[in-house]
Amino acid sequence: MDFTEVRDWFALLKPRVMTLVVFTGMIGLLVAPGHIHPVIAFTAVLCIAVAAGACGAINMWYDRDIDAVMRRTRNRPIPAGRIEAGGALGFGITLAIGAVIVMEVAVNLAAAAVLALSICFYVFVYTMWLKRRTPQNIVIGGAAGAFPPVIGWAAVTGSVDLIPLILFAIVFIWTPPHFWSLALWANDDYRRAGVPMLPVVAGAKETRKQIVLYSLLLVPLTLVPWYLGFSGPIYGISALALGLGFLACVVRVALDKQDATGVSLTNDAPARAAFKYSILYLFVLFAALAVDRLIG
Amino acid sequence: MPELPPRPTETEADELRRRRKPLNLAVIWVLLALAGLFYAITIVKMMKP
């Protein structure tokens, strides 16, 4: 049997992005005080996953013109002509509405409201407004990806308080160095597509500086749950060690061999390494928080 | 009146059906899974004091 069409519809959901979103959502759910029935917890995580996928599909519909000119994205189902743009939009809207309704009916109103807010933020604020207009696109737009731990927390408690907002802030501040590491080596793609990513607008040198600045903000911020007594030494020591690793990576990005304009002479090897490490960093950091809360 | 596209031949219709089959099967499985999930949610909600 030929599963190409099924694979293409699934690809619209950006499954790799979904993984991180689902994971941080699950951590929000695990570390929140209180009890939630496993079936309801599963439903909440499923709604977060489906909503993230819906955002991916709507984003692919809206960005189909720039996806077609970027090497990294030109083989996506819409620019490659394997799925019609209108079909992808309908798919995305249906999934988004369905996820919010199921979250409200099965879980609670607070989680559904934050889920709806995150979808609207990603689609209208990031994709349609900021992405093509300002180099601050992923700074402000990063908020969309920071909502899942808040949604997970709200699913258990029915409310939002300080700790989920700190988790939100951690993902929010982590997003710029993560994305700009990618943007450094995908710079030509973004320039060709006319997307004003920071390296395109301000140059590689300024981007390296900003990556270091955001990382310097990130590391102390990750220690706040420990400082507030929400977590113990398992998380605290892990956050510190991971943070030092993150700083080592971004310092290598800043010190990369470069020409007078800041363009890498090493094919951006340190930026590629920093991008990979940043994904691992967030996974392990949040896992450490969950382990600390569950066994600490 | 707009001109209708030509009717597919028997072979083309067979090919279309063959290509559509995996997607149709996937949709059936998703719908069955959703029905199961909604059933489980209902039971959990009914158990609540």
Image: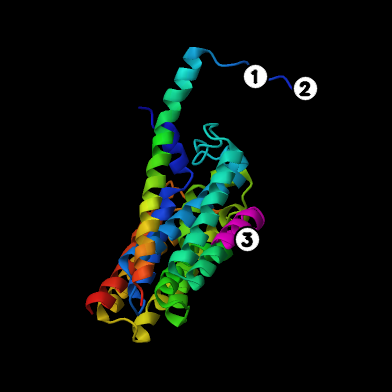
Residue A84 vs A225, above or below: the answer is above
Chain containing mark 3:
A
Q: Residues within 10 Å of mark 1 (few under 14, many from 20)?
A: few
Numbered badge on residue A224: none
Left/right placement of residue A242 relative to residue A85 reads left
Q: Residue at x 49, y 13 (%)?
A: B10
Numbered badge on residue B1: 2
Residue A129, image x, y percentages: 66, 57
Q: Residue at x 38, y 62 (%)?
A: B41
Left/right placement of residue A256 relative to residue A34 reads right
Alpha carbon distance from label 3 to label 2: 42 Å
Could you tell me which secondary element the residue under label 2 belongs to?
A: loop
Alpha carbon distance from label 3 to label 1: 41 Å
Return the residue at label 3.
A125
Disc 1 marks a residue whose amino acid type is: Pro
Chain containing mark 1:
B
Q: Residues within 10 Å of mark 3 (few under 14, many from 20)?
A: some
Left/right placement of residue B3 relative to residue A204 reads right
Could you tell me which secondary element the residue under label 3 belongs to?
A: helix
Give the magenta-colored segment's residue range: A119-138
Disc 3 marks a residue whose amino acid type is: Val
> Main SS type for the magenta part?
helix
Which of the two discs, 3 and 2, sits closer to the camera?
Answer: 2
Q: Residue at x 77, y 22 (%)?
A: B1
Residue A161, image x, y percentages: 47, 81
Which of the two discs, 3 and 1, sits closer to the camera?
Answer: 1
Residue A128 within the segment the image draws in magenta: yes
The C terminus of chain A, quarter of image: bottom left
Pick whichever, A192 or B5, lies toward us. Answer: B5
Residue A13, image x, y percentages: 47, 47
